[in-house]
Amino acid sequence: MVRISEYHRPQTLDGVLALLQRDQSTVPLAGGTDLVPSKAPDAQAVVDLQALGLDQLSVEGFRIHVGAMLPLQRLVESTGVGEFLAGAAHLEGPITHRNAATVGGTIAVGDPHSFLLIALLALDAEVHLRLPDLATLSLDRILDAPRKFLDGGLIIGLTALSPHGAPGTAMAHVARTPRDKPIVAVAVRVTREGDRCGGVRIALAGVADRPIRAYQAEDRLKGQPFDKGLVDLAVAAVLEHLNPPSDFRGSSEYRREMVAVLTRRALLDACGKLA
């Protein structure tokens, strides 16, 4: 059990960083749905981020700009972020959760079954940090080594492609019930250049210890003819190096089969939007 003996609510980013860099027993508190000390059981102090004003949301051309403290429900209700991202945020949990959980907190927790994280991976999200210097890293790099970048540092926001910059998007998933976390989920984004595939993003949840990108499959699809064969090639490429874990919700073999079904479904949907 985590026992908190100190509570701080600084008014500035510098004040927050000064506290976080004291030692690893001091951790940030965003929405409070998944307190980061759950991954750091020795935590003794929390730093409340609510006074920093990091809850902005704007859409400018091809990019969406999101503050780290933006509640997920704001994404759900936004008309500018598009159905793909809003729908992913909606699937993160019930409205009580979405009203409290934040975008930055979702990234910091790195839930391997997160709909929102795979949607952001498909949208080429970049995360803005104070370390204490300003830094911008891809979301995938943050998820790959969160302790390396977040210990003593802070997520302050992110940018991702807007619906204008990413018209060919789709998501598919399978779960025990419609409101459960997914057993497997796939998010894709496709671009088209004439009769060829301009590029593909394929992000997977429920197949590793974090949400992942299928980079080898993406590389293989770029420049291929934009036809049904593209989908068949994508499914084979995604499965080639995939070895998901087994648990009580599904075996590794079941997850591989679902990845094949869901990748095909999502790609056909995304490609249909570009036809």
Image (cartoon, rainbow, N blue to C red):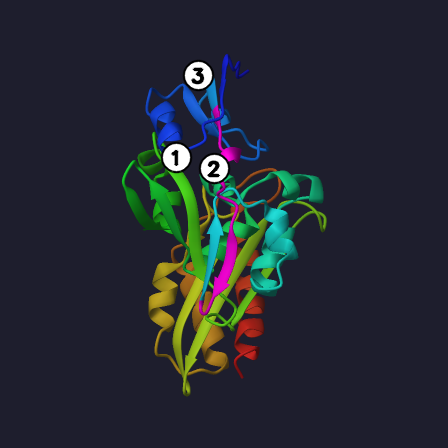
Q: Looking at the image, do the residues carrying marks 2 and 1 touch, with CB atoms under 8 Å apart? A: yes
Is there any visible trace of residue 174 in the rendered image?
Answer: no
Image quadrant in which you'd find residue 132: top left
Residue at 38% x, 64% y: name it: 217
Residue type at tag 1: Leu
Image quadrant in which you'd find residue 147: top left
* For residue 47, above or below residue 75: above
| Label 2 or label 3, whichever comes before in sequence order | 3
Q: Which residue in the structure is indicated by mark 3?
A: 42
Across and down, in percent, residue 193 comes to 39, 83
Near-viewer residue (275 or 98): 98
Is there any visible trace of residue 224 in the rendered image?
Answer: yes
Bounds of the magenta segment: 47-62
Element assignment for label 2: helix
Q: Which residue in the structure is indicated by mark 1?
A: 13
* For residue 146, above or below residue 120: above
Element assignment for label 1: helix
Across and down, in percent, residue 78 comes to 62, 58
Marker disc for residue 52: 2
Q: Residues within 10 Å of mark 1 (few under 14, many from 20)?
A: some
| Label 2 or label 1, whichever comes before in sequence order | 1
